[in-house]
Amino acid sequence: MDRLEAPAFTLRQLSFLVCAADEGTIAAAAARLHASPSAVSEAITELERSLGTQLTVRRRARGLTLTSTGADVVARARALLASSLELEASLRGAPGELVGPITVGCYPTLAPTILPALLQGFGRAHPRVELTIVEATHDRLQGRLEAGQVDVAFVYDTLIPGEPQRAKLFELPAHVVVAGDDPLASTDAVRLEELVERDLILLDAPPSSEHTMSLFAARGLAPRVRHRVQSYEAVRALVGRGLGYGILVQRPANPASYEGYPVAMKEIAPPVAPVGVDVIWPGTPAPTARSRALIDYARSLPWSVPR
């Protein structure tokens, strides 16, 4: 039998390099790793010495950047570290038991709809899986799947850079939100032409803002934006006080704003195309068994969304 040889570098050195690449500075990586900056710097230097090539460019004022070789090593290191963690997790659990971490990304306005049922049901079925939640808009999720920082994400079906795998969970058309005492609250549906002279409370978070503006643009209209907010509940709160109307997709069962002011959800006439809600995950490497189980569980749920 051929003698097995150990590599000249360690998993610890690889993990320090990956963390430094993610954080952009040695100091930030040290804080995340709960190590000293000198320990992180020395580990990366020793890794470069072992591999016989420069992996990083470190400048005090500009932080740390990867060389082309460094970028390739980081990509390979992520897969190697993920396999190592998967091996460790598989040995901690009984045969067939799912054990280990999953980082779940979720668009903020989807969180109240997606996360409660998902965390409760999946958590009960797999109590030794550690779920970490990252709420982020689509632009902030960019690159996190490819970087291995997010395992599974729940997003609107607009473009996410890269080539993630995806499956549709449900879809809904956008609707108009008006105050409970607004004359439009008693109508069956609202035409966008009726709104252009009114004040719009815009949910200013990608892709929601772009989607709202595109609905008007498709009809040759330009809405009058009074306030831009980044919170779904902030839109409903301002609408409830009569400060304008909103265009939203998610439909909470509660017919009142956060403050208790009544609001009404009205369909748009003529109907607009629905917006899909997808679960996505990296194309490579293949999802772990626990991530695959989470994806399958999400797809199996009978998503009941108020209409």
Image (cartoon, helix red, strand yellow):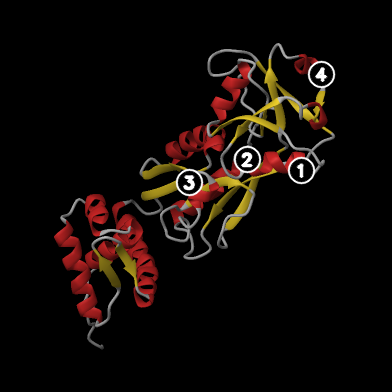
Labels 3 & 4 near each other (Cβ < 8 A):
no
Identified by mark 1, the residue type is: Ala
Q: Mark 3 or mark 2, which is nearer the start of the sequence? A: 3
Q: Which residue does the numbered mark 3 point to in the structure image?
A: 105
Mark 4, Cα crowd under 10 Å, few <14 / some 14-19 / many 20+, is few
Secondary structure category for the residue under label 4: loop
Residue 217 marker: 1
Judging from the image, what secondary structure is the residue with disc 3 in? strand
* Pair 3/4: label in front: 4
Q: CA distance from mark 2 to mark 3?
A: 20 Å
Query: What is the crowding at mark 2: few (fewer than 14 residues within 10 Å), some, or many (at least 20)?
Result: some
**Left/right of residue 6 with respect to residue 78 in the rendered view:** left
Q: Quadrant of residue 247?
A: top right
Assign a secondary structure to mark 2. helix
Question: Label 2: which residue?
Answer: 209
Q: Residue at point 68% right, 42% down? A: 211
Residue 76 x/y as whole percent = 38, 71
Camera-nearest label, 2 or 4: 2
Percent x, y for residue 219?
82, 41
Whole-angstrom CA distance, mark 2 to mark 1, is: 12 Å
Q: Quadrant of the C terminus?
A: top right
Residue situated in front as seen by the camera: 216 or 254: 216
Question: Which circle's residue, 3 or 1, is located before the other in the chain?
Answer: 3
